Amino acid sequence: MPRVSRAEAESHREQITDASARLFRERGVKGVSVADLMGAAGLTHGGFYGHFESKDALAGVAVARAFEQSVEKWRKRVAAKPDDAARRAVLVEHFLATQSIRNVGLGCPTVSLATDVSREPVGAPIRTAYLDGLDALVQILSEVEPGPDAAARRAAALADYATMVGALLLARATEGAPLSHELLAAARARLLPGVPQATPPAPAPAPARHKSKEA
């Protein structure tokens, strides 16, 4: 087979990274095989090790990419608002929106990857990428928090972000039950007091169960 050009190799690496950033969030790092990742990138399985020495090495790069995407979204959202109060509100509202429950593959990696990362050894590439990415998001939030100084604003951002992440994590775990939307609404009300809350959608009806025929 003819060798691919350097530009093609770089393009393939980007395809693998982007596909992995999405699939890892959707299924977890352990729930996706190398074949799955390469298939999602539109490439053959055998070419993987020409780009990454291992799936663990890819995980670090892919998680960093996932956080880069979130940071970019957050920066665009705050840039479109006129003051810090509006900037903080738009970050909270987007994060705790009802559609965030199912928007896993393109949603915030802080929530979707927390369990995977917590099970990896200290020093693993994925832990480093997660720590750096989490800190970058907290920094953006701290920039729009009220407070007398940087330390107070960072403390407020850490508390608020922990509330946001916990609420969304639990909302996903209870999807389909009224509690799922109650969790998001309660977190929004706590973080944005005085801001009118949207009426949560009615829970989806449970799928019909078919009675088995007696023998």
Image (cartoon, grey):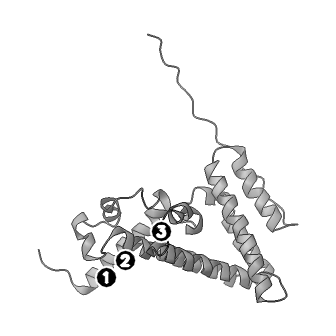
Q: Is residue 93 above or below residue 101?
A: below
Instruction: Tell whether 73 sits left or right of 63.
Output: right
Which kind of residue does numbered mark 1 sit on?
Glu
For marks 2 and 3, give the CA distance: 26 Å
The residue indicated by pointer 2 is 14
Instruction: Tell whether 127 sits left or right of 93.
Output: left
The residue indicated by pointer 3 is 121
- In x, y percent, where is residue 79? 67, 84
For marks 2 and 1, give the CA distance: 6 Å
Question: Which residue is situated farthest in the right direction here?
Answer: 194
The structure residue drawn at horizontal position 77% and vertical position 63%, both measured from the top left corner, is: 188
Secondary structure, mark 2, is: helix
Residue closest to the eye, 120 or 45: 120
Q: Nearer the viewer, mark 2 or mark 3?
A: 3
Secondary structure, mark 3, is: loop
Q: Quadrant of residue 148?
A: bottom right
Q: Quadrant of residue 133?
A: bottom right
